[in-house]
Amino acid sequence: MAKFPITLSRFIIEQQAAHPEATGEFSVLLTQIGLVGKMIAHDLRRAGLNKILGTTGETNVQGEIVKKLDQIANDTFVRVFEHSGLVCVLASEEMEKPLKMVHEGARYMLLVDPLDGSSNTDVNMPLGAIFSIRRSRTGQSVEDELLQKGTEQIAAGYVLYGASTMLVFTVGQGVHGFTLEPSIGEYLLSNENIRIPSKGKVYSVNEGNYHRWPAGTQRYLDYLKVQDKPSGRPYSGRYSGCLVADVHRILLGGGIYLYPGEKDKPEGKLRLMYEGNPLAMVVEQAGGKASTGTMRILDVEPKALHQRVPLIIGSAEDVSLLEDYVQGRA
Ligand code: AFP
């Protein structure tokens, strides 16, 4: 008889069994993240139809305001978590200030990029959502409790809205991927204990920014393009405009994603608290590396909720070599 597929709920309960002190709240939190993924996937499936259905992005045929998908994704996180009793605060790329949830005493703090790669909605390209989970010591969700280093995260992951919808996360015991089976609305274990290759053959970067990069970064990209079979060069370029999709490809197949600092923007574009830190936890848990080019992402001391950080993430050997170039050792 075929083995019964492992659902997200069963997997979390089995993982939790190893922690008798666990209250089950955390398991429910992860399951609720999965629910948000299902709801947003549903909206994205018809994003391209909005125009055809006569919605102009202002008011649709039902007289409802058709909000941008970023706002819809953010609202979905708020609606699912505000009365859940699981989370005392929700911080989001879409909200200037963290939003206190109804149950202030709840144990967890949730930080999200609710829709990553939003420029891809109109061209049917991949999108994602990124989440970071922290424990609240006071339950009061004061800002400085949020602004802790990435090493303080207790869980992190992403939802990838691609050809299929996937939920990939870590609670510090490896990285596991679940694929949504839409016909039954369940996430089934599809990638148990993901390990990233120590070295890859793919680089993912917006090369349009080449002339704005510091010399070390430019020299590294030039190096990847030189023909040299023994070192697996030239690498192949793959860039989707969605961080989650590009990092997911690299997590499974190896390689390096870069959104480096630029001469006039040394902090780069991506956000530390809800993009860099959660993806760094996932990739490190799979055996990879995540760096600013000069230091480990998870060790960056946050100063502000929406602060940006240069992000170089992927296979350990590839990230280490980039660091050698940036720091003048290569
Ligand atoms: P948006 O979510 O604002 O579209 O940004 C997407 C993103 O943060 C990341 O998902 C992409 O890798 C990167 O920006 C694309 O940025 P460029 O368009 O500057 O290459």
Image: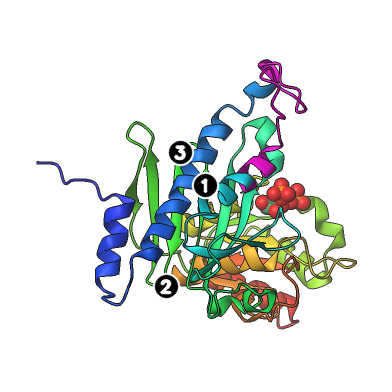
Amino acid type at mark 2: Gly
Answer left or right for 20 relative to 71. Answer: left
Q: Is the residue 246 above or below the residue 276 in the image?
A: above
Mark 1 lies on a secondary structure that is strand
Q: How many labels does the image show?
A: 3
What separation in Å lies between label 3 and label 2 (alpha carbons)?
25 Å
Amino acid type at mark 3: Ser
Q: Which residue is drawn at 69% across and 26% down?
A: 64
| Quarter-of-image position of residue 319 | bottom right
Specify the label residue 160 is tagged with.
1
Amino acid type at mark 1: Leu
**Residue at image mark 2:** 172
- The residue nearer to you, when weighing 265 against 220, is 265
Q: Which residue is drawn at 66% across and 23% down?
A: 50
The percent position of residue 154, horizontal first and vertical second, equals 48, 73
The percent position of residue 41, horizontal first and vertical second, equals 52, 38
Answer left or right for 249 relative to 119. Answer: left
Report whether the residue tagged 3 is closer than 8 Å to ligand 1.
no
Q: Do the residues labelled 3 and 1 touch (CB within 8 Å)?
A: no
Which numbered disc, 2 or 1, marks the residue that appears first in the sequence?
1
Q: What stretch is highlighted in magenta?
A: 51-74
Magenta-colored stretch includes residue 69: yes
Q: How crowded is mark 3: few (under 14 residues within 10 Å), some or many (20 or more)?
A: few
Mark 3 lies on a secondary structure that is loop
What separation in Å lies between label 2 and label 1 (alpha carbons)?
20 Å
Q: Is the residue 138 above or below the residue 49 in the image?
A: below
Closer to the observer: label 3 or label 2? 2
Quarter of the N terminus within the rendering: top left
**Observer able to see residue 253:** yes
The percent position of residue 305, horizontal first and vertical second, equals 72, 69
Mark 2 lies on a secondary structure that is loop
Specify the label residue 164 is tagged with.
3
